[in-house]
Image (cartoon, helix red, strand yellow):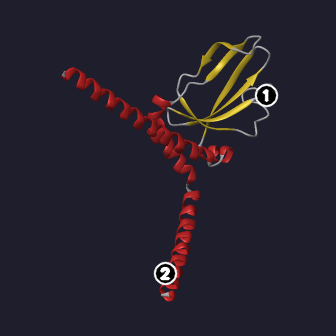
Amino acid sequence: MEDVVITGYNRLIELIRETDQSIDCNAQVIRSRDAELLGRMGEITAPVIKNVGITILEKGKKDNQGEIYDAKHYGSRVFILGKSNELAPYRPDDMNRPVIDQFCLLSEDGKFYEVMYSMDDLVIDSYLGELTPHQVLDLYGYDAVYMLYKGMKQYLEGQDALMSGLDVTVQFLMKSTEQ
């Protein structure tokens, strides 16, 4: 009996080693094509962003309490993929405008962008620049890939819950019209 247990255990260890080697090999292929993967994910996700994305502030004024008024938003919806921990010292369009916040975005056009916000005593404004998938990975790392995947997974789960709720409601309504 002990030989059967040892043989089975040795086979288990062998399978673990084979799996680890396969994971290492596949991970290497994925790393070599990670920007291609992110780019394709962005293209595929674009139509969904029209429904689930948000609009972001382009420019606005702030009052004495710090509230924004006369806000102008960008025209297309976006999905936020990450926030920069290391802010650019200034915006590319104006070296006199220091960056106070910086985010990576996926837009409904399937392209990646970086938005940089600046602020003075009266005005909050921004710079929106397009990024390649390579630049996204260089600046924001694999967190951007994870956030895109996780966001779409959560959206689907929400849609499932909504469909379930709508189904129950429709069934209830159908029963009340039968009476």
Q: How many marks?
A: 2
Name, please, the residue furthest toward the left: 178
**Residue plotted at (33% across, 31% down):** 168
Distance between the Cα atoms at labels 2 and 1? 63 Å
Label 1: which residue?
98
Quadrant in the rendering for residue 107: top right
| Image position of 60 with respect to 112: above or below | above
**Which is in the foreground here, disc 2 or disc 1?**
2
Quadrant in the picture for residue 120: top right
- Taking 92 as reference, is 176 left or right? left
Give the x, y percent position of residue 31.
59, 57
- Between residue 29 and residue 161, name the one nearer to us: 161
SS at badge 2: helix
Image point 58% across, 66% down: which residue? 24
Going by the numbered disc 1, the residue's amino acid type is Pro
Judged left or right of residue 129, residue 9 is: left
Give how far across and how far down residue 174 sits, in percent. 24, 25
Residue labelled with disc 2 = 8
Q: How far from the left and from the top, in percent, is residue 166?
A: 35, 29
Please determine whether, in this image, residue 145 is positioned above or below residue 51.
Answer: below
**Secondary structure under the numbered disc 1 in the rendered image:** loop
Quadrant for the C terminus, please.
top left
Tell me what residue is drawn at x 55 percent, y 55 percent: 33
